[in-house]
Image (spheres, rainbow, N blue to C red):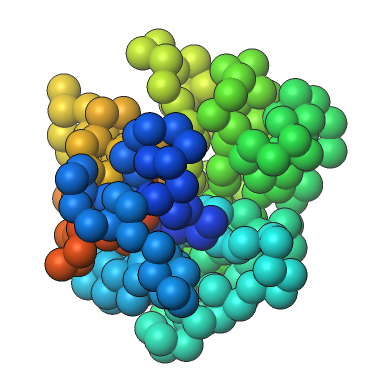
Amino acid sequence: MRLTIGTFNLWRTGEPWRYAAERNTVRGAVPGSAAVTMRPPTGVWSRRLPLIVDTLRRAEFDLVGLQEISDESRGEDPVVETLADALGVNLARTPDGQLALLTPHRIRSSTVVPLTVGVARDEAVAGYGSASILHAVIAAPGGDTNFLVAHWTPRSASARIDAAQALIAYLSGLPYERLVVVGDLNTVAPEKPELALLGQGERQLVDAWAAVHPGHPGPTMPSHDPAVRLDYVFLSPDLRPVSTRRIGDRPDQDGFYPSDHLGVVATATALE
């Protein structure tokens, strides 16, 4: 039995021209290309959405977690529904416009786990990261799988540690098998203490990328010239990663990338 598991930050509100004009930097576009300054009449999202659909279709995933899925300024923003329809899969999402998951398999249950206190909650309220964790039980090949999606703040290591501790506390009540955690964890410091927490204790999780590519950092951001790894797939030890790859690295003819992040996809086998 094999499971293909992914994570991808959709950067729903991202517009390369805005970063070029306001920050003099390139995000989500090939440097020097038309996409750096182009402002399509129907919006940049109309150019990026087909690229995201194509990227996810090529990934052939069993489970994929998504972050930054909505543009709250537009009210109801049915992006995930559009993706699910285009790919012919099932979905679950959080109401805060931050997290979602897609799967071709049956979703037995989905739960939004709020971060009720702490620095991580404060950061999320300020607009950095998600104020919750998305947890679903998926009837995946080989058996039910607990699948969790998170998005941590980029601004504060203490907030990410707080979020990691909240995640670990919640995981303690779940079976320690067929357990998957994915997300944009925004870890930039070399020591990554927040990630170390996930690999410690009696219920350690395995960083799929590091297990398959020891010594290779696997950066995922920015998409045109990845320098840091922000996007992760963690597995319980009974799921052995056998391959990992990055996705979303194909710009279109004008230089638009699907996102300013690359996604990560891991394929794992279940140990008997």
Point out residue 131 in the picture as x, y percentages from the top left corner: 73, 44
In the shown orientation, is residue 193 left or right of residue 171? left
In the shown orientation, is residue 175 left or right of residue 266? right
Q: Nearer the viewer, residue 48 or 131?
A: 48
Q: Is residue 140 above or below residue 152?
A: below
Q: Is residue 160 above or below residue 262?
A: above
Q: Nearer the viewer, residue 241 or 103?
A: 103
Point out residue 169 in the picture as x, y percentages from the top left corner: 69, 34
- Report the residue that reaches farthest toward the right: 116
The image quarter in which residue 190 lies: top left
Point out residue 70 in the picture as x, y percentages from the top left corner: 60, 63
The answer to whether any part of residue 7 appears in the image is no
- The residue under the point 38% across, 83% down is 87
Q: How many marks?
A: 0
The image quarter in which residue 125 lies: top right
The quarter of the picture where the C terminus appears is bottom left
Point out residue 167 in the picture as x, y percentages from the top left corner: 64, 37
Q: Nearer the viewer, residue 206 or 222?
A: 222
- Report the residue that reaches farthest toward the top: 191
The quarter of the picture where the N terminus appears is bottom left
- The residue under the point 60% across, 20% down is 156
The answer to whether any part of residue 149 appears in the image is yes
Q: Is residue 89 above or below residue 58?
A: below
- The residue under the point 41% across, 22% down is 188
Q: Nearer the viewer, residue 37 or 85?
A: 37
- The residue under the point 61% across, 77% down is 78
